[in-house]
Amino acid sequence: MKALAVNGSPRKTWNTAQLLEQALAGAASKGAETELAHLYDLAYTGCTSCFSCKHLGGKSYGRCAVQDGLAPLLEKAAAADVLILGSPIYFGTESGMMRSFLERLLFPFVTYTPGYASIFPGKLRSALIYTMNISEEALANNSQAKLMERTESYMLRTFGNCETLMVCDTYQFTDYSKFLPGGKSQAPRGGLSQGPGKGLCPGRAAGPGGRELNNSACRNEKGRSLRTGLFHWLERETGFEPATSTLARLHSTTELFPRGGGIRI
């Protein structure tokens, strides 16, 4: 089995990347071949509206015809068994690099037929991970969650499945006094990412629309693994043990942070 994670954050060691790394670690522990790709390392554009992917009988029908730095990754994504996309929320939606990736990943497989049927030829399990500094309560009372639900609906239409995890209350930087009047010079202890496998918050995770996930992520239970409701399908489909599969184990040996700590995007 091949599991591919795609990081839509410019930060390679902070929380979006850490969550993706932990998901891949769970897959690798059960023998999966894994890879983490960083979109900000690649030179590419979004969809150019050439419609080569829609040209019936054309050599690029059903696939993106643009040949640039993203082309090899699109081929890997289409061939993967598990595809996990991670992005911070920038200005209310996915990062620009992730949006461009989504355009070119999904649009070629959607047909101009009733219901916009998908012609994706493979069998792929997909998931979305979002990190954001908005609180879970605020997320439930604004339209931002609807934008993420829309992306999930596109993934569902294309691949037939999609799981979504929204991680709220994340820190954006270490010294808020540089950016906010009256901000603290340092974020609270335990609220900062400290490298892969460390510093993951006890914080809060919500499903689409702000509703709390079952066994939701990042509860602070000292001495116990941090569990999430994401990727039950991976456990079900592959037999991964809950303690090691994907995001089910975010933390195993390092000290759990006090309740209410945050993490950087």
Image (cartoon, rainbow, N blue to C red):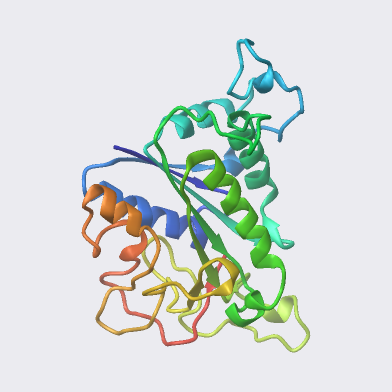
Residue 17 at least partly seen:
yes
Residue at image coords 66%, 44%: 97
Of residues 15 and 86, the one nearer the viewer is: 86
The image position of residue 222, as x and y in percent, is 29, 84
Q: Residue at x 61, y 79 (%)?
A: 135
Counting from the top left corner in percent of width and height, residue 180 is at 75, 80
Residue at the far front: name it: 114
Is residue 92 shown above or below 259?
A: above
Looking at the rendered structure, the number of numbered marks drawn on it comes to 0
Quadrant in the picture for residue 111: top right
Q: Quadrant of the C terminus?
A: bottom right
Percent x, y for residue 238? 25, 48
x then y, percent, for residue 77? 47, 34
Q: Is residue 187 left or right of residue 220?
A: right
Q: Considering depth in this image, is 126 or 117 the residue closer to the camera?
A: 117
Picture quarter containing residue 19?
bottom left
As drawn, 172 above or below 184: above
Residue 110 versus residue 240 in the image, above or below: above
Q: In the figure, is residue 179 to the left or right of 30?
A: right
Residue 10 appears in the rendering: no
**Residue at x 66% of width, y 52% of height:** 95
Q: Residue at x 67, y 22 (%)?
A: 54
Look at the picture and state if 238 lies above or below 46: below
Q: Quadrant of the N terminus?
A: top left
Name the image quarter holding residue 99. Answer: top right
Give the left or right position of residue 212, taking residue 184 as reference: left
